[in-house]
Amino acid sequence: MLAVARSPRLRRLFVAPGNPGCAESATIALMDLSDHGQVIDFCRQNAIDLVIVGPEAPLVSGIADDLAIAGIACFGPSRAAARLEGSKGFAKDFCREFGVPTGEYRRFNDRRAALDYVRTQGVPIVVKADGLAAGKGVVVASTIEEAEFAIHSLFDGSLGSAGSEVIIEEFLSGQEVSFFAIADGNRALAFGTAQDHKRVGDGDTGPNTGGMGAYSPSPQISDSLNERIMREIILPTVSGIAERGAPFRGVLFAGLMLGNHGPKVIEFNVRFGDPEAEVILPRLRDDLLECLWAAAIGNLPEKSPSFSSAAALAVVLAARGYPGPVEKGDRIGGLQEAANVPGAWVLQGATRRDGDAIVADGGRVLTVAALGGDLAEARSRAYTALARVEWPGGFCRRDIGARASTFPSSG
């Protein structure tokens, strides 16, 4: 949102549902995002030129289709194209059909068959919920017992309908990276890289989350590897989904595993995922609003957007208990003091205003980020800023970006 707010082309910016941080740069629009008719009415009443869809759920439910029917430009894929994120089974089948490299897998609707399969395959192995699970539907099992527990949990409804089908995948070793591209229905351009930290605890321990921090650019992605990923993964995906009658307009975010096998797709997202967007967008030199508008109307330029050589790093402050149940209502202080650190800024996530106070209102509550001449400087600034936040009920990982310098670059 902040990157859009900086555009000289912007006249008015509304955000829904928003939070107290968003209110500093935009007008909060109160509406039910699941009610597409309400969203369309708001757009018409306020002469909205472009809708930028951030969350995955509205895309999977077809908000881009309904906006298109209403004649309102939308940056975000159709319901059919959004299945790349909405169904992991669909995405795996799609990769197989169009020759996009990914790991071996099987889809299961039957608990017993899934249990028999993991016992036959052995560990490590990956168990995933088919549907949307806010980053919590993936278990990398190192023991058969872990895999069995994950299968039972999903089929018992721990994630609701998201776990009604289970995907079991081979474990891929290597380094995980996030690769972004922007597409206009026919063409796609590279749009930055990052490395996320999905596990809740230091040293990549504990359950998967929606992301506990990230940095950009990824030192793993050389120019030659960037070209290879575009050639072998992004372009075949964009052309393949168009061939299926669902031209992709929006962000295609590929979670990749880099190893001796070359880049392979772990998963697709179809929107600016966080915390990766928080470290990619601040490095963008071009006007983000112009980029999004060009993609939405099917008119991307020939040249990829330009990014600064600076590094960015972000650390998520989450409520204790996350990714499980958390307590809400704790007051948070020191936000301005944190933002006063040179090169740093604070982004609010699950917050709300209680009188004059900002209080925690969910799991991932704040993201503290910073730019630097290199990753070490960005990391130092981010953690210096984070130390100024006053919130005893919050926690974060202390090792975001710590291992980056030990990773060999990939070709």
Image (cartoon, rainbow, N blue to C red):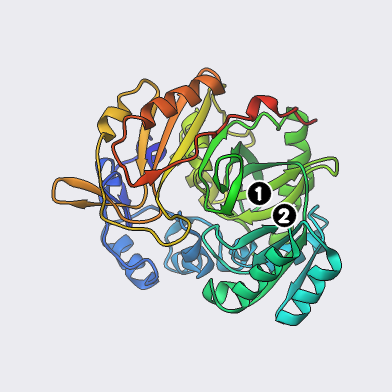
Q: Is residue 200 left or right of residue 226?
A: left
- Residue at the (37%, 28%) spot, across then down: 385
**Residue 333, relative to residue 100: is it above or below?**
above
In the picture, residue 35 is in which quadrant? bottom left
- Residue at the (37%, 45%) spot, across then down: 394
What residue type is disc 1 on? Ala
Element type at marker 2?
helix
Crowd tier of the residue under label 1, counting other residues whose Cα lies within 10 Å: few below 14, some 14–19, many 20 or above: many
**Residue 123, relative to residue 365: is it above or below?**
below
Percent coordinates x, y for residue 209 in the rendering: 53, 53
Residue 108 visible in the shown view:
yes
Q: Quadrant of the N terminus?
A: top left
Q: CA distance from mark 2 to mark 1?
A: 10 Å
Q: Is residue 247 left or right of residue 114?
A: left
**Residue 121, relative to residue 389: is it above or below?**
below
Percent coordinates x, y for residue 99 in the rendering: 83, 56
Residue behind mark 1: 254
Q: Quadrant of the C terminus?
A: top right
Q: Nearer the viewer, residue 159 or 99?
A: 159
Percent coordinates x, y for residue 2 in the rendering: 37, 38
Count of numbered circles in the view: 2
- Residue at the (50%, 70%) spot, across then down: 61
Of marks 2 and 1, the one in the foreground: 1
**Residue 324, relative to residue 1: is it above or below?**
below
- Residue at the (36%, 40%) spot, across then down: 347
Q: Which mark is residue 237?
A: 2
Which of marks 1 and 2 precedes in the sequence? 2
Extreme top residue here? 373
Q: Nearer the viewer, residue 269 or 329?
A: 329
Element type at marker 1?
strand
Crowd tier of the residue under label 2, counting other residues whose Cα lies within 10 Å: few below 14, some 14–19, many 20 or above: many
